[in-house]
Amino acid sequence: MKNFALGAALASASLIAPFTANAATEIQFWHAFTGRLGELVDQQVKDFNASQDQYEVVATNKGNYSETLNAGIAAFRAGEQPDILMVFEVGTATMMAAKGAIKPVYQVMEDAGVDFNPDDYIGAVKGYYTTTDGKMLSLPFNSSTPVLWVNRDMLDEAGVAKDAPLTTWEDVGKVLDQLKASGVDCPMTTAWQSWIQLENLSAYHNVPFASQENGFAGLDAKLEFNGPVQVKHIQTLGDWAKKGEFIYKGRRNEGGADFRAGTCALFTESSAGYAGIKSEAKFNFEVHPLPYWGDVDGAPQNTIIGGASLWVMSGKDDSHYKGVAEFLSYLSSPEVQAKWHQDTGYLPITKAAADLTREQGFYDANPGTDVAVKQMTANAPTENSKGIRLGNFDQIRGIIDEELEAVWAGDKTAQDALDNAVERGNQLLRRFEQANR
């Protein structure tokens, strides 16, 4: 991969003549980041632009993940698409099916003559965005996996021993009882309930979320997340909700503000919560592996990624694609990726970035920051744990959210809610299959 001498580039940036700057090819990059993550992306773009004078990347926030995807689709239809579009992982099947809308990353890099080796990327990340023969369709950028965040101060105040295990959900249940008994109003909350409490739960326990290898093996996949393991887990959370031990905050990451403010003790969220928690938390916090059910054979397997990848849109000229290739190569360079990983909590997408982070002593100085990496790479992914690739998945998540909310409110049993979600979601899968045969 191409390494960029940022120091030298920054030092010489002021010497670039105005005429050269005006001649730079503009590369439009639409993303879904705000807050601290948005600031870090802006800095990456600024550093790349300062490192050379041929291209100018312009980064624009287009809302949340769903809004950014919809904005990209609408722009393509109007012939006003950006060069690079950030798409969250549940949009992968949609982008793959968008014939003529995208230019595969492997083709972009090959045509531009930029060094690119898919094998440089971590397997559990790479597999999500590649074809069955290993050709990378989009560039993994911000890949995360769920972990358990702990407010250590709240546990101490509740009398929870420092060595009290939080390894299994059985362990968590005991700690929640203790927290509630001590008067804690929010013992546990979660972000992204479908992704963490169903999608990752299934992978972590090596049970299918859907047939056909979770959709990787064919468009005729059917949802299967209403099995015994999933039902047990959702019913347990529903029971905890009745006792006031699990507090539902919302479908996305509404609970993040509560955890960072120090009002919730346990929080299941993305490893990428690290950026916000580190900058905002006024308490001692810990990061633990995602809990698993101790009575499920083979658990824990491995969790799966969330986050997003960068898709290159079609309809641009060769000068744009050359600039896109250089920018994507820059983002993948070990130094840039290691810093991104260390600043955000997102996974290092390349082996070199992970090795560099370890060599720099970051994991030793920041205990727990390697939890997500270990969790993803402890076991080789199986057909049930390599990821999920389903059409209309964003809409299916909306259905799952509705049904889970009925469980948290005590209006439905977990079995009824998950059965309904599977039935309703399969209708959307059949529509996607029919449209993309």
Image (tube, grey):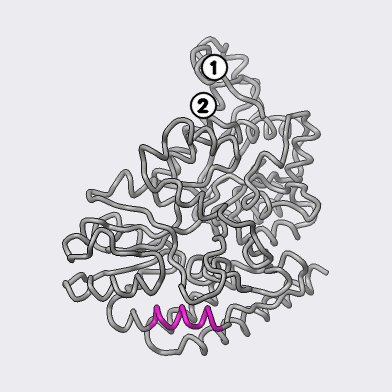
The residue labelled by disc 2 is 47
Q: Is residue 27 left or right of residue 45?
A: right
Q: Nearer the viewer, residue 198 or 313?
A: 198
Quadrant including the N terminus: top right
The residue labelled by disc 1 is 9
Q: Is residue 219 left or right of residue 25?
A: right
- Which residue is rendered at x = 51% and y = 85% of the image? 417
Q: In terms of secondary structure, where does tag 2 sit? A: helix
Tags 2 and 1 touching, CB below 8 Å:
yes
Label number found at residue 323: none
- State the CA–CA distance, disc 2 to disc 1: 9 Å
Q: Is residue 259 left or right of residue 41?
A: left
- Which residue is rendered at x = 34% and y = 70% of the image? 172
Which quadrant would residue 180 be assigned to in this image?
Answer: bottom left
Q: In terms of secondary structure, where does tag 1 sit? A: helix
- In the image, the segment drawn in magenta is 228-238
Q: Give the amino acid at mark 2.
A: Asp
